[in-house]
Amino acid sequence: MGKSMKYKIVIFDIDGTITRHVSSWRLIHEKLGLWDVLARKYQDAFLTGKISYRKFCELDAAHWKGIPEKRLHDIFKAVKYSKNVKKTLALLRKKGLRMAAISTGLQFVTDKIKKELGIALVRGNRLNARNGRLTGGVTVNIPHGGKGAYLRKMLKKEGLRPHDAIVVGDSEGDIPMARIAGYSIAFNSTSAKLTAISDYKCRTKDFLEVGKKILEIL
């Protein structure tokens, strides 16, 4: 098999990679004016191992109970993409590569990129809603540290193997994907560990560099 056939799919992280904001959860807190009040406390408890990731998500979701789902979709309408994301995706599609995105972020960002960027294979977490309002519950599809396991499952379902995949991420949570992929790119990485294990380190804020590197390795 020729080298040009080696990679078949590119899997992106979303928050901080495809989009400029770093966390869907934090963005909601900040826009609703709740970040400093309770969220930091929950985050610290999770980071110091006092509570599980699921518990952390449940605590966050609980104090958004009753908020109209539409209000959150509206918040995410204003979310900006990294520079030249659309151009990059168009270039990669032209080369016949498939696209996917895996995130610990929420449906408001995964729905947005599905619709606006045409990435069909997208998975994230969901705040539960009933009759258009948040119930205070959450469905955790991708737990903290769980992106690698989900990636394996997704690739298998699509008839692909880990070495068929190129992974692009920016943080600690993307390490499990970077470890199993055929090729990995760190995009403005916030994690020294991710930077160390990635095949390529992208240091500009222009996503086109990611696209050009992928075209080069094809």
Image (cartoon, helix red, strand yellow):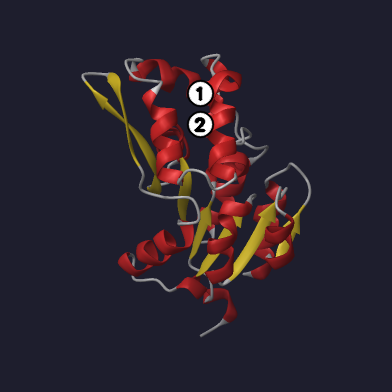
Q: In the rendering, at what x and y percent does residue 83 appear?
A: 68, 37
Is 181 situated left or right of 122 in this image?
right
* Residue under the image location 69 percent in, 67 percent down: 197
In the image, farthest residue toward the front: 50
Regarding residue 130, the answer to whether it shows in the image is: yes
Q: Which quadrant would residue 127 be assigned to in this image?
A: top left
Is 207 situated left or right of 101 in this image?
right
Amino acid type of the residue tagged 2 in the rendering: Trp
Q: For mark 2, what is the residue? A: 25
Q: Give the structural element (helix, strand or loop) at label 1.
A: helix
Q: How far, Cα to Cα, is label 1 from label 2?
A: 5 Å
Q: Is residue 199 above or below residue 188?
A: below
In the image, farthest residue toward the bottom: 1
Instruction: Determine which of the numbered discs, if any, sits on residue 175 in the image.
Output: none
Q: Give the structural element (helix, strand or loop) at label 2.
A: helix
Q: In the rendering, at what x and y percent does residue 98 appear?
A: 45, 58
Q: In the rendering, at what x and y percent does residue 122 appear?
A: 40, 47
Q: For mark 1, what is the residue? A: 28
